[in-house]
Amino acid sequence: MTQFKPGDEVFGVCSGALAEYVCTRESAVVAKPNNVTFEQAAAVGVAALTALQGLRDKGKIQPGHKVLINGASGGVGTFAVQIAKSFGADVTAVCSTRNVDMVRSIGADRVIDYTHEDFTNGAQRYDLIFDLVATHSLPAYRRVLTPHGTCVVAGGPPKVRAMLTLAFEVLVLSRFVSQNFVMFVAKLRKEDLTFVRDLMAAGKVTPVIDRRYRLSETSDAIRYLEEGHARGKIVVTAA
């Protein structure tokens, strides 16, 4: 360890993080911005990296792109809305009625309430669809993509067989159409943690925390998470 010294405030990614003390690699943590609390920093991790890598690396997001984020109120989705805006995109967010105001407050240009409107039947075409919940078929996404648009799939069915089927469909479809369909899993990169850190320090990204649980309440936190209705992230504190 050469970059940090005892007492430095850091955040990052590690295995077995639901503990009072953990060990991780120096390459897995970066300095915490002063304007971000430890609870907010703890919410970054894989969620923010998935949003960043999905939009920037797989989606090739550019200023002025029309971007739709399906599942915008979840852990990855709330980061994706803000990161897409930081790239200068025009963002349409899809979520349920109870989350419309929250998603709009973090920067979405337009919010579609999926309980009242199906965006795949609309007239708008998108340069990039970032799909976090797999609520529509790939042909349905094709209808609302531009001719050379991209659909990045970063979420899917909970059952392994269904997920593998979706991955196969994504691979096959991209070979036969002008649009690009891609499925991916985020990778831990220190430079990407630093990128997100800088966005937070600049006030362009603020982690959204739904609920906080004490370490002794971890089982309750997991049960709530499994319900699938969390807004933003759930944080477990050591206190």
Image (cartoon, helix red, strand yellow):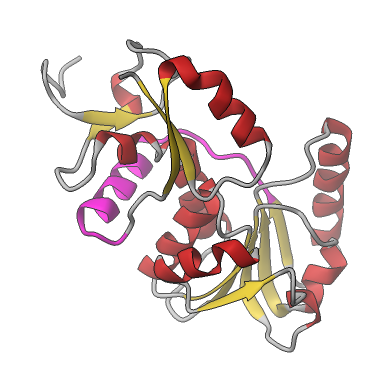
In the image, residue 21 sits, relative to residue 202, either above or below, namely above
Task: Point out residue 105 in the picture as x, y percentages from the top left corner.
Answer: 41, 69
Task: Point out residue 204 in the picture as x, y percentages from the top left corner.
Answer: 29, 62
Say which quadrant the C terminus sits in.
top left
Magenta region: which residues?
183-204
Look at 48% across and 56% down and name the residue there.
78
Residue 175 visible, this angle: no
Task: Verify whether residue 184 appears in magenta.
Answer: yes
From the viewer's side, name the closer residue of 221 and 19: 221
Could you say which quadrant of the image residue 120 lies in? bottom right
Residue 28 visible, this angle: yes
Relative to 48, 152 lies left or right: right
Could you say which quadrant of the image residue 142 lies in? bottom right
Look at 27% across and 46% down and name the residue there.
197
Task: Verify whether residue 187 appears in magenta.
Answer: yes
From the viewer's side, name the closer residue of 74 and 97: 97
From the viewer's side, name the closer residue of 58 and 83: 83
Look at 41% across and 50% down and name the residue there.
208
In the image, residue 176 sits, relative to residue 159, either above or below, namely below
Look at 19% across and 43% down and name the residue there.
33
Task: Point out residue 192 in the picture as x, y percentages from the top left corner.
Answer: 37, 43
In the image, residue 73 sits, relative to residue 116, either above or below, namely above
